[in-house]
Structures are given as C-alpha cells and as structure tokens.
C-alpha cells in the first residue's frame, strides 16, 4: 500500500476511508467491511459523531484477526469549542477512549477558529452553534498557539503520535511553524479540481507538511446536505460528468472517480473518499497503479474556479470568514 511520510517520522496510507456523513448505526459494519476490502486509513472527527462506532468496527477486525492495531492509521480532529488548553486535552483523552484504541495516530485542529466552550453534557455535538435551535454562534479568544501547545503535550503523553491542522492558510502555517516544538505532520484541506489551492499545497509540501485532501469529488460530497450547505454545489457541473474528466477516464479505462483520486495521489496528496457501494469501495483503493500524463494533470488542474463548498463564511447566518 502506498504511503506518505510524516514529519513526525511515522507514515500514513495515501488512500483512506473518510467517516464524514457515515450514519452512526452503520459505522461499525462499514468500517469492518472497509478493512476487509483493504483500507487501513480511517479519517474521523469528533464532529462526525461516530468515533465510538468506528472504533468498534476496528476492534472487531482486530479481534477477528484481520489486522493488528499497528496496521491501521486513525486520524481524528479536535472541534472548535475545545481550543482552550485544558479542554483540548480533556477532549483528546475522551476521543481516544471513544475509539477504544491505545492511541490516535494523527490528531488535527479541525478549523482555525475557537468557539465558546460548551460542556459536552449540555450539548454533546454543537457543530457551529451554542443552542439546539442552531441560531447562536459565538467565537472565543483562544490563540492557536495555546491549542497547538496542548496538542504537543498530547504527543508527549502518548495520546497521539502525530499532530497537524485542517483548513489552515499559508499565513497560519507559517505562524505555527514559528513556535512549534513538534512538527506539523499534516494539513487537511478541501481539495478538488474546482479548488486547487496551488500556493497552499506548494508551501505545505516545501515545509515538509503532508497534505490530505477532502471532498476530492468536489460538489458531489455536498449534495446530500441541507439546502444552505449544498447551494454552491447545486450551481456547478458535477466533476464525474465533466468532459475533461470523462475524456481522461476513457483514455485510461478508469472511472471518473478514480481519475479524480489519482489526480491528487500522483501529486503526493492523500485522499479519504467514502462509498457505501462495494464495487466503488474497491475502485477507490485501486488508484495508484496507473499514471496521468503531465498534460492530463495540467488540464484537470485548469478547471480551478477557487470554488469552496465547505465555507462557514457562506453557510452560517452569522458568517465566520475563515477563508476570506
């Protein structure tokens, strides 16, 4: 299995399975089947609300002798309400225990914004809001440095082996690099031909930060969401059906999805697609045994529109303009 080296000295599979939008009641079985199919990287987050169930699927696979703990790589993320140092550490321990594994392989700061703390006992999965009605959004004054130092202590204490960030800009990466005691092992970003982010990708790779791209299929990932979250996705052609992607897929005898994944992995960007379709689940793993030409890579990259679908500056009533 192809891997990507992390600055921490560990390695991570180049293709994994993303747990975003996997329903809690099927997560354990989905993860178990993905392991049987050959997946070894699982990308989760507190906000996905299925860490416990994902851990159950992994532990069942270990119990049944399909894998050992060291065979799988678990990524999960710290949510925005828990950026204060004490809260970040408490949450990391709780998340590790939810997975039911000895350690987390890679722990990320999910977004570069702190929201007001709310006790999990009051609202377990707040997402962006402080209330059940999803009306109140409150940011908090917590510098990224405080949160990063908590992450470093978690590595010291063996809770996680590598740490990184998600949805960060070049400016924020440079800032963290200026004081980091432990390396930024990974940057996770929205990455597809409609949002290439070439400067960010280049800068991160120059600094030895491994990149994972999410939503590799672009608008496809967002059509299942409520109206405000899918509005941008409804206004553009699906990448699966785009003539450029179709042309390249036909030239290689591959699916459009495989071409989109290979466009990323050939540039050393890890991918984390999900699928409930067994055939597609297998196809998504089989993307590193063919190569796109330099011209094909460039033609796909030229589809860039700077179009971001995961943007709280767009879909929140009280916008949080992280990317502006």
Image (cartoon, rainbow, N blue to C red):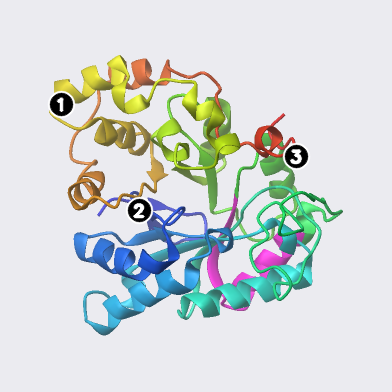
Q: Which residue is mark 1?
A: 252
- Asked if residue 310 shows in the view, the reply is no
Q: Is residue 161 magenta?
A: yes
| Residue pictured at 45% horizontal, 31% vertical | 219
| Residue pictured at 70% horizontal, 39% vertical | 316
| Residue pictured at 54% horizontal, 80% vertical | 97
Q: Extreme right residue here?
A: 141
Q: Is residue 160 magenta?
A: yes
Q: Which residue is mark 2?
A: 16
Q: Earlier in the sequence, mark 2 or mark 1?
A: 2
| Residue pictured at 50% horizontal, 42% vertical | 225
Q: Earlier in the sequence, mark 3 or mark 2?
A: 2
Along the horizontal axis of the image, is 45 left or right of 169?
left
Specify the segment rendered in magenta.
147-165
Looking at the image, residue 246 lies above or below residue 322: above
Q: Tell me the CA gap for discs 3 and 2.
A: 29 Å
Image quarter hosting the C terminus: top right
**Residues at marks 3 and 2 touching, judged by CB atoms closer than 8 Å:** no
Which structural element holds mark 3?
A: loop
Residue in the foreground of this view, choosing between 81 and 88: 81
Q: Extreme bottom residue here?
A: 63
Bin the neighbour count of mark 2 within 10 Å (Cα to Cα): few under 14, some 14-19, many 20 and up: many
Residue in the foreground of this view, choosing between 258 and 154: 258
- Label number found at residue 184: none
**Residues at marks 1 and 3 touching, judged by CB atoms closer than 8 Å:** no
Along the horizontal axis of the image, is 315 left or right of 241?
right
Residue 102: image location, x then y, percent = 47, 81
Q: Which residue is mark 3?
A: 320
Quadrant assignment, res 160:
bottom right
Q: Tell me the CA gap for discs 2 and 1.
A: 22 Å
Residue in the foreground of this view, choosing between 49 and 67: 49
């Amino acid at each position: 299995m192809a891997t990507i080296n992390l600055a921490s000295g560990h390695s991570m599979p180049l293709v994994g399975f993303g747990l975003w939008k996997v329903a809690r009641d099927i997560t354990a079985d989905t993860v178990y089947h993905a392991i049987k199919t050959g997946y070894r990287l699982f990308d989760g987050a507190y906000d996905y609300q299925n860490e416990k169930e994902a851990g159950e699927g992994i532990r069942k696979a270990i119990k049944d002798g399909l894998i050992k703990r060291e065979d799988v790589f678990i990524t999960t993320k710290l949510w925005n309400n828990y950026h204060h140092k004490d809260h970040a550490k408490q949450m990391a321990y709780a998340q590790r225990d939810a997975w039911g594994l000895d350690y987390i392989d890679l722990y990320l700061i999910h977004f570069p914004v702190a929201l007001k703390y709310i006790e999990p006992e009051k609202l377990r999965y707040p997402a962006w809001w402080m209330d059940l009605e999803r009306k109140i959004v409150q940011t908090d004054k917590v510098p990224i440095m405080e949160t990063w130092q908590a992450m470093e202590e978690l590595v010291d204490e063996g809770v996680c082996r590598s740490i990184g960030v998600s949805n960060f800009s070049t400016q924020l990466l440079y800032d963290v690099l200026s004081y980091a005691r432990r390396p930024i092992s990974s940057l996770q970003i929205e990455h597809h031909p409609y949002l290439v982010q070439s400067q960010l990708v280049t800068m991160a790779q120059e600094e030895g930060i491994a990149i994972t791209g999410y939503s590799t299929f672009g608008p496809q990932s967002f059509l299942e969401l409520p109206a405000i979250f899918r509005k941008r996705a409804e206004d553009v052609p699906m990448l699966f059906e785009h003539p450029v992607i179709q042309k390249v897929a036909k030239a290689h005898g591959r699916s459009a999805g495989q071409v989109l994944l290979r466009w990323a992995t050939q540039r050393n960007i890890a991918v984390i697609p999900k699928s409930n379709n067994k055939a597609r689940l297998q196809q998504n793993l089989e993307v590193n045994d063919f190569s796109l030409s330099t011209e094909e890579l460039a033609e796909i990259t030229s589809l860039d529109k700077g179009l971001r679908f995961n943007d709280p500056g767009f879909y929140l009533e009280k916008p949080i303009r992280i990317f502006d």
